Structure formats: structure tokens, C-alpha cells
Image (cartoon, rainbow, N blue to C red):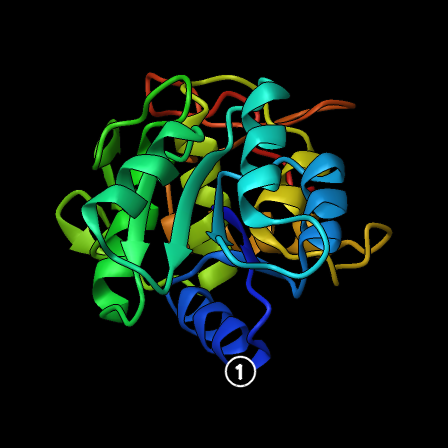
Amino acid sequence: MRVLVVEDEEALADAIARGLRREGMAVDVALDGDAGHEKSTITRYDVIVLDRDLPGMSGDELCREIVSSGALTRVLMLTASGTVEDRVEGLSLGADDYLAKPFAFPELVARVRALARRATPATPPVLTVGDLELDPAKRTVSRAGRPVELTRKEFGVLEVLLAAGGSVVSSEELLERVWDENADPFTTTVRVTVMTLRKKLGEPGLIDTVVGSGYRVPVAGVATAAEDG
């Protein structure tokens, strides 16, 4: 899951980003509305956590821009005011959800995950293919009823592949969706992560390499050409 936090209070922005990263999300940060707008036009985010009161482009204006662009990105708006009037106004701008400061971090995480599940096409709360089961909320993976211990990046790659419903996902998309903006696009990070993921998931293989295109998990749950790479 790729998330952008747009918040001008740097300490709060960093705290939110660190917390979401601990939950396995790839998180970028913008400290003003203009930077948030630039990042949101370059990268496809699943969710944008957006402070309403921002220097530069306001949170309201940025929300309008995101909605008018037709992007599938979901917007969770943050504000220091939690009155009914403010919530109604924020939602009327096109925000998908609204959270008043101060907030409980577990609630923020739950709302971000709920918004991400509302992407198109919608994904179920638990992803299952064959005897493999991945629960994004609990951060658990099991195969044939046995738990599989994965790193955050391995978990993220598997989650994206399962959510694709059998479609091919390119290395570039995996890098964009699972890693943050600091990732080097010219490394072999994705290939190495897929290799270790395959080993941990065991046999029969689940992840296909589609030469020249990327990777996929067949909906039948058994890979047809699980190559290292």
C-alpha cells in the first residue's frame, strides 16, 4: 500500500509516517500543499492523509485537485476542528473520510486500510489463493494452515500480487507500490525480494515470472513457470 502524508507539522508528519511504515505501508511525506500536489501528480497513491490547514496550496484546494483529476486515490482529511459543520464541509470537498486531531493512531491505521480496500477494483479484507491466505489487517500469511513469516517488503509484494487477481504486475509497479520514493529504480531489489518470497512460500510454486512483463500469482494458486527473477 502506498500512502502520502501531507502535514505541515513536521513532528506529527514524521510520527504518522513512522507508524504507518511499521504497519507495512510505503509512505512519502510532504510538508506543504504545493509539495503534496507535486507528489500526488507523479505517483499513484492508494491513500493520501491530508491536513486541511496547509501552507501554500490549501488542503481544501489540494483535495479538489485530486478529486477532479479522476484519480482512484482515497483522501483522509485531518483537521484540528471536529465539529459537524467542518466534517460536512470536508466531505463535500470530495474527501473520502475525515478525522479530527488529536486522534488515536490505531483508528488512523484502520481508516487508512478501509479506504485502501475501497480502491477500484475493490479487494476483500482477506486475500486467498489456493491454500494461501493473507490478512492485511492482522499482517499474517499462512499456507495450508501453517504461518509464514515474511519481512515487510515480502508481505507488501505478496499483497500487491494477490490483489491483482491473476493479472501481471510489473517490477516497476511493485517498486512504486511497496517501496517509497527513496527506492533506487535501478536496483535488483524487486527480483531479490520475489526470490526470497518464493522460497518462504514453498512448493508448489505460487509466483509466475512473465518474461519481459513482471510477476503474477495465478488464480488457481499454482505457478506455471516460477523462475528465479
| Outermost left residue | 145
Q: Is residue 4 above or below residue 220?
A: below
In the rendered structure, which amino acid carries the disc numbered 1? Answer: Ala
Task: Say which quadrant the C terminus sits in.
Answer: top right
- Name the spot of residue 2 as percent of width and height, x first: 53, 47
| Residue 60 visible to the viewer | yes
At 81% across and 58% down in the image, what residue appears? 184
Give the image quarter of residue 116: top left
Between 137 and 216, the one lying in front of the other is: 137
At 78% across and 23% down in the image, what residue appears? 212
- Name the spot of residue 211 as percent of width and height, x first: 73, 23
Q: Residues within 10 Å of mark 1 (few under 14, many from 20)?
A: few
Q: Is residue 10 above or below residue 198?
A: below
Assign a secondary structure to mark 1. Answer: helix
Q: Is residue 206 above or below residue 55?
A: above
| Outermost bottom residue | 11
Give the image quarter of residue 107: bottom left
> Which residue position holds label 1?
11
Q: Is residue 49 above or below residue 118?
A: below
At 55% across and 48% down in the image, what residue appears? 59
At 72% across and 22% down in the image, what residue appears? 213
Q: Is residue 11 left or right of residue 217?
A: right
- Name the spot of residue 102 as percent of width and height, x first: 28, 72
